[in-house]
Amino acid sequence: MENTLQWIERSRLGDRDAFARIVEQYQGMVSAVTFNLVGDFAAAEKGYTEAIRREPTSYYYWQRANFFEYTKKDLQKALADYTTAIQCAEKEKADSPFHHSEFPIEAIYQNRGKLYEKLGEPDKAAADIKKAK
């Protein structure tokens, strides 16, 4: 099974199929970022939902998707999104050959800790904030 880095290398060598796979893989993320920039909340949320559907183990999408739940005041769903982001990031970090500073697990723990504080769960908040350091 090929990964994104292999597709990029093949694409750089002129392989149109590899380029098409990159576009297919990341179009949800690109759409979401683009919509975020123009300020269309519903379209941005739809873009992230599509990105998660296509790449359900991406911590990147999960940690950003909670923004929509938080904004809609669905704090339990936002909390679940943070938890999923942490699980995905920890798995990706363990499986990755890349330098581990690329994985913002500490920042996700920090944000989830703040949300636990807001939800009135100080013990869970303190545990997450400790993991963030």
Image (cartoon, rainbow, N blue to C red):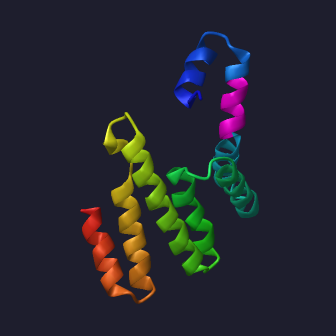
In front of the other: 91 or 61: 91
The span shown in magenta is 19-26
In the rendered structure, does residue 67 fall within the stretch colored magenta?
no
Q: Position of residue 120 (x, y in %)?
A: 41, 89
> Can you say which quadrant of the picture contains the N terminus?
top right
In front of the other: 106 or 36: 106
Residue displayed at 60% across by 23% down: 7
Residue displayed at 49% across by 66% down: 82
Left or right of 17? Residue 110 is: left
Left or right of 24? Residue 117 is: left
Relative to residue 69, is residue 34 depicted above or below? above
Residue displayed at 38% across by 83% down: 117
Residue 74: name its quadrant: bottom right
Number of labelled discs? 0
Q: Position of residue 67 (x, y in %)?
A: 57, 66
Residue displayed at 44% across by 77% down: 115
* Secondary structure character of the magenta stretch overall: helix
